[in-house]
Amino acid sequence: MLRREKVLSVISIISIVGFFGSMPVGAQPGHNTALARLERLSDRGKFLKQRLGKKVNYLSTGSKMIVNFGEQWGSIKPILERAVERGGFLKEGGMDTNVDKSLAPLAPFTGNNPFAKSDFFSRFAGSTQNETSVGWWGNNAVCGFNDTGSFAATFLPLFDPTLPPSPSPSSSFSFAGWSRSSKAGAAFTDKGILVADPIPDDIDARDLLGDPVVRATSSSTFYYASIAQDIVADEVVGDGISVSKSTNGGFSWGGSVMASVVNGGDFLDKPWMAVKPGSSDSIYVTYTKFDFGVTSDITRIELVKSADGGVTWSQPVKIVEGSERILVTNSQIAVGPTGEIYVAWEEFDESEERSIKIRKSIDDGKTFRTKVEVSSVIPVGDSFLLQGSFRANFDLQGLAVDTSGTATNGNVYIVWHDGRNLAQSDFFAFDGQYHFADILFSKSTDGGSTWSVPVRINNDPITRKADQFMPAIAVDKTGKIGILYYDRKYNLRNFLIDVTIATSKNAGATWTNSKVTKKSFAPIPGVNDFFVDEDYMGDYIAIAQDASKTNNGFIGAWGDNSLGDANIGVAKIK
C-alpha cells in the first residue's frame, strides 16, 4: 500500500494491530524505557517551541511533528500507561472487512489496495502521509514520504506484548515510509517502514524523523535522506541528517549514516540532496542549522559531501549565515552537466520581506561564488496559512538543472509560489490581506549569474481568486520541463484541491497545463492525527525525471485526500 491507517488517539491507537504482519524480531526495551524515550522526544518538541518562539513556524514539517508531539504528549502518555495496565490495546473485536470495492476507480493510486483491511478498525481517526520525494532510474523508482503511522508502528509494540515486535531491532522510531516501482512508475507497492538499523554500537537508537529526500544513481542504488536523532540512555546525544542506502533497487535499506550531526542543543533541519553517479557515488546534502547561542539564535545553510557512496562525510561548508534579523532556510541543491553545484535558499526578514538567493560552486563544493538574488517573494495566504488553515510558508519549492545534452543543456530553473499578483482584504489575515498563490518560474542561461523576470506558470485568469502552490520541478532527457503543483482553479470556492502538471518544450517560453488528479479533495482530511495539525499538507510534493535518461516524461507524487483520509497519490506523466 501507499498508505496505512494507524492512529494516535484513544480509539484509533488500537488499530495498529492489523497492520503489522510478519516483522523481524529484535531485543525490545521495557515499556518504562520506551516511555522515557517518548518523554524525551516530547521534551525536545517543547524546547524547540519555547526557544524559537515565533520562529518555530520556520521549522520543517518533519520538525514541526516533533513540536506537535510535545504539545500532545499529555494526552498520549495516559493512553500508553493504561495499555500497560491492561496488558495490551485490543482484547477483542476485529477488522471491518465490509468495504465497497466499487469505489476503487476513484482511488488516486497505481498498483496498490487503498481499501486494506487495517484501514477500518476505527471510523474516527487516522494517520497522515505527506511530503513526497521520488528517485527514478530506468524501470526502478522509489517514493519516500512522511508517515505518522510508521511512527506508531515503531513504538506501540513496546507497550503491548501481544503485538508483533517493532520492525526496528534497536527499537528506534521512524516517521519514514517508502514505496517502490519496478515498472518505471506505472505502479507502486508500499514497502512499509524505513528504519535506521543496523545502528552504530555507540548509540542505543537512531530515530528517523521525516522530511524525506530520495535520489538514484543506478537501477540498484538509491539514497534516502531524513532528519534524525541519536539516543543514548534515553537521552538525545545528537541531532542530524541521516542518509540510508539501498543497493537492491529500493527493496530494502542498509543502516543509516549521519551525514552531519550536532549536539549541545543546536538543531539540524530541512535537508535536501543531490547526487552525482560514478564508480563511487558523490552525494551532496544541504540543510538548515539552528545555532542556539547564549544571547541570540541564528540559522545557517550548510553543505556536506560524501565521495564514497555515503560511507564517510566531509565537514560542513557554510553556504550562508543569517542574523538576528534575517532567517535563512529551505535550501535546494542541484548538480549541473559538468559537475557544477548550485545551492538556492530563501531569506526571511523580520519585517516579512522574503527573497530567493543562489550560489554556485565549480570545485565540487569546496568554495562558492558570491550569492545572487533570483527574485523577491511575496508570501501567499496570510504569509503562513492558506485558505483551509494549512501552512504553505516555504515559498521556494524547486531547483533544477538541464542535463539533457540538448540545446538547453546547462540551463538552471527555479520555481516557487508567490502572492504578488492578487490580494484581497481579510480581517483575519496576519497582514490584513489574503494573497492568492501563483506559480512563478525564473531561469538562468549563464550559469546562475543572471535570472529572467519571473513568469506566471498557471493559466487561469490573473483575476481569478484561486491558489496554486507547492510546485516541484524536473527536466527530462529531451530537455522538457515539468512543474507539478497543487491547484484550486477547478473549484469556484478556492477550497478543494487538485494537482496540475505544466510542461514546456522550449525552455520555459511557453507552457501547457494539464490536470493530473481524477478527483478533487479538501485540504483537511477527516481524521484525527496528533502530529500534523496545520502542517497536514507538508512543505513540498515531488516530480522526478528518469536519471538514467532511458524514459521520457515524469513521475509525480503528492499528498492526496480524495478518499477522505490522508494518502499518497502517484502518477506516471508523459
Image (cartoon, rainbow, N blue to C red):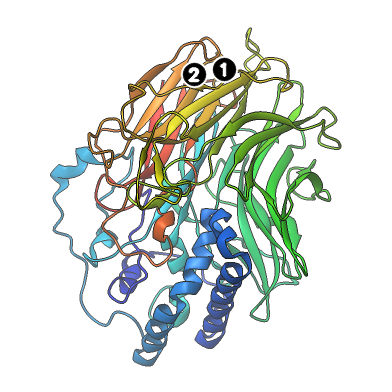
Q: Can you give x and y, in whole percent of width and height, for residue 36 in the image?
A: 56, 83
Query: Could you tell me if the residues under marks 2 and 1 are in contact, i.e. CB atoms within 8 Å?
Result: yes
Q: Which residue is depicted at the point 27% across and 55% down? A: 116
Residue behind mark 2 = 552
Depth check, front residue: 345 or 23: 345
- Please tell me whether residue 177 is drawn above or below residue 360 in the rendered image: below
Question: Could you tell me how far apart the alpha carbons at marks 2 and 1 are, in whole angstroms?
Answer: 6 Å
Q: Can you give x and y, in whole percent of width and height, for residue 445 in the image?
A: 67, 15
Q: Which residue is depicted at the point 36% across and 23% down? A: 462
What is the number of callouts on the image? 2
Q: Amino acid at mark 1?
A: Lys
Depth check, front residue: 397 or 299: 299
Q: Which residue is depicted at the point 74% across and 64% down? A: 296
Would you call the spot at circle 2 few (<14 residues within 10 Å), some (14-19), or many (20 or more)? some
Quadrant in the picture for residue 298 = bottom right
Q: Can you give x and y, in whole percent of width and height, for residue 358 in the image?
A: 70, 32
Q: Is residue 135 left or right of residue 76?
A: right
Q: Which residue is depicted at the point 39% across and 67% down? A: 530
Depth check, front residue: 374 or 3: 374
Q: Can you give x and y, in whole percent of width and height, for residue 448 in the image?
A: 71, 23
The C terminus lies in which quarter of the figure?
top left
Q: Is residue 183 visible?
A: no
Q: Is residue 311 left or right of residue 464?
A: right
Q: Is residue 170 left or right of residue 300?
A: left
Residue behind mark 1 = 477
